Image (cartoon, grey):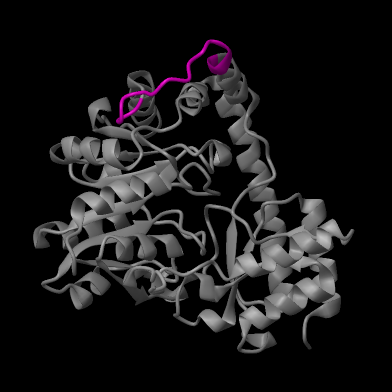
Amino acid sequence: MKHSIAAERMRDIQSFHVMALLAEARQREAAGQDIIHMEVGEPDFPTPPPIVEAGVKALQAGKTKYTAACGLPALREAIADYYARRFGVNISPQRIMITPGASGALQLVLGALLNPGDEVLMTDPGYPCNRHFVRLFEGIATGLPVGAETAYQLTPEHIQHYWRKSTRAVMLATPANPTGTVLSVAQLAALYAEVQPRGGQFIVDEIYQGLTYGIPDVTALAVDADNIWVINSFSKYFGMTGWRLGWVVAPEWAVATLDRLAQNIFLAASTPAQYAALAAFTPEALAVMETQRQALQRRRDFLLPALRTLGFSVRAEPQGAFYIYAGSERFGDDAQRLCAAMLDKTGVVFTPGIDFGSNQATTHVRFAYTTSVARLEQAVERLAHSLPS
């Protein structure tokens, strides 16, 4: 009898390296050790009360049946209204698909676009699931090495140099994970101007939209509202991580294809979560989110200079999300070992760069400022006494 063997693609779809650190951290917490979490991309804020209340009311009213695969019409309309009010961009609600998280949106987009061997250009470092989803659909994820000189973002020159006959799409993120850097509308337009004439697809991950500091909040749809793919989520700015709800804005020609694919992959997003999200655009909820955004900015403003004082290098300042991608070269060339050592010595957990690609990954780490300033102060004090000299 033969043993079952996983599909070949699974060799290329890796676990997060930080999960081993997280598992150890939780064991230590269970044993009574005080752990300061700076590794997971989930702020310590609860979901805004108006959203929770709307979800409870939906459950009490028995709104637990399937919705259409594309989502509640009222929620699609609310998102379209949000784009119009906040960004001055007019989008038909019919082009908005509600999905189980941004991951569900990404599956739809890549499933609809990629044939085996199609190439998707993206940044290295970048969010690892992006390349893994490309591999899942038998595409080729090509991570382009980017550094602080381009704020860890792609430039038109990257596209000119790396575009090949097999290239199908370019995928960007703004604000970006792990770097927190942001692209302006002008930069997005310049990139799109390289992709569109080549017949490529332009995919922009905007799941940290709303979380920017000192600069305008923008959307790639301001460049071309009709032909750019935008992936977004209720997880980050709206504080609904565990509700698992996202959306995609797709070109009109792709909507029927995405609808058909959604019916087969997940049928529909969570119905109670969709009803809850209707309250995300109310003035009451938006006021809570603005308060939380300001709190995150205060955390960034404390942690950024503190990390530099400790000896970490930050050459491209984060202007969005809630991450700082820091060079750890002063402390050796094995960031994963550094993270493990700091957990052991200090109880402070942060993420090694190898989770985000291979470009200078062993000398970079990511700090998530997802806990209070008081806890960040404790983390910095502990690290100051334990980092290698």
Query: Does 251 sit left or right of 57 as displayed?
Result: left
* Percent coordinates x, y for residue 290 in the rendering: 59, 34
Q: Is residue 126 above or below residue 232?
A: below
Q: Does the magenta run of residues contain 64?
A: yes
Depth check: give the residue in front, 120 or 187.
120
Find the magenta span and give its range: 58-71
Q: Quadrant of the C terminus?
A: bottom right
Instruction: Report if residue 219 is visible in the image.
Output: no
* Percent coordinates x, y for residue 279 in the rendering: 52, 21
Q: Main secondary structure of the magenta part?
A: loop
Count of labels in the image: 0
* Percent coordinates x, y for residue 79 in the rendering: 37, 28
Residue shown at 76% from the left, 71% from the top = 343
Instruction: Report if residue 234 is visible in the image.
Output: yes
Q: Does the magenta run of residues contain 109?
A: no
Query: Does 375 sit left or right of 121 as displayed?
Result: right
Q: Quadrant of residue 261?
A: top left
Residue shown at 39% from the left, 28% from the top = 82
Residue shown at 24% from the left, 73% from the top = 157
